[in-house]
Amino acid sequence: MPDPLSYIDVQGLAEFGIWFAYSNSEESKYRQVDGELERAVMKLLENPLGIHEQALALRNKRMELIAANIANADTPRFRARDLDFQKILAGANPSPMAVTDSRHFDTGEVEAVGGIVFRTPYNSSVDGNTVEINVEQAKYGEAATQYQATLQFLESRIAGIRKSLRGD
Amino acid sequence: MLKNIFEIAGTALNAQTIRMNTTASNLANAGSVSPNESEAYRSKRPVFRALVEQSDLNQGFNVLGGVKVKEIVDTTDPVRKVHDPGNPEANDEGFIYLSNVNEVTEMVEMVAASRSFQNNVEVVSTARQLMMRTLDIAKA
């Protein structure tokens, strides 16, 4: 919307009169509302899906890891893995308890990279496999639910965008 | 994406099927006899290995994380030697060698393989549902 004072300088009073009449008209009010809506929609479209897009990929990665654990339930010496969301979020990578003295016992706790951690089994097995199928099934169910939750967030985002674009 | 879960569970279904096949083979050959010790039937066992190394990707597997049957080995339990001169398979001294198949172990193996198979079917089924829901996102 042009500055009314500059209008007077450049275009003269007659045009100011036209502008003044226009700015108070019904049409102009609609335009203003439209402008605000437009800005809101643009903001939404800049990052339409928010964090949920990456979250879905992460949820999927976790499901993949647990599926791999279940697939290797009978593989000797296989060590079950999982994702540690907190570690990924914090970006921290605290090292496991270190052996700093010859009299220390090694905890056997090893951390993999990229937020992937090895699961500590409740019971050890003779073949060195740390997959406990009940635990894995429970975790898989949990991961599937979390995936669905993220999906739900995405769905409502998309529904919102649709609604704003359709404008009814 | 979710497709990888199908692949991973697929390798496991394949491996467990091989396990069930060897069990079936073992049970079928439980009564096999042989005239000498070296030819006697020994029950077979698949050896599973996790697909974790990049080199595994060159062997027809598309994703890491699954399982493969590394090899199938014979069990080392001794075979039974029975004196049965009337048997057409008996050797000059009248002995036959039976298989070392233990039916009870094989049945346990079969049930374990079948359970593991079911677990992986469940994984596929859940992943499939989620995939369908993900496709439905366009309808939101």
Image (tube, grey):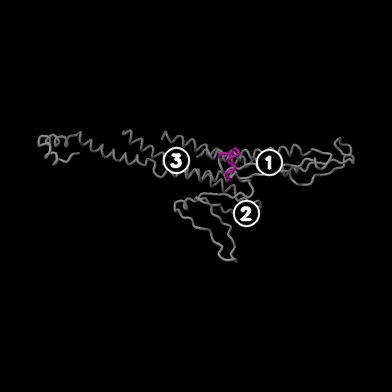
| Crowd rating for badge 1 (residues with CA inside 10 Å; few <14, some 14–19, many 20+) | many
Out of A29 and B33, give the one closest to the viewer: B33
Q: Residue at x 43, y 36 (%)?
A: B137
Spatial CA span between label 3 and label 2:
36 Å
- Amino acid on which disc 3 is placed: Leu
Q: Tell me where residue A162 appears, x and y as whole percent.
A: 36, 35
Residue B93 highlighted magenta (yes or no): no
Residue ID for mark 3: A151
Region in magenta: B52-62
Q: Are marks 1 and 3 on the same chain?
A: no
Disc sitting over residue B110 in the figure: 1
The picture places residue A36, in percent across and down from the top left corner, at 26, 40
Mark 2 sits on what residue? A124
Identify residue type, mark 2.
Ser
Q: Residue at x 81, y 44 (%)?
A: B80
Q: Which numbered disc covers residue B3?
A: none
Establish whether labels 1 and 2 are both on one chain: no
| Chain letter behind tag 1 | B
Answer left or right for B50 relative to A17.
right
Q: Quadrant of the C terminus of chain A?
A: top left
Alpha carbon separation for disc pair 1 and 2: 23 Å
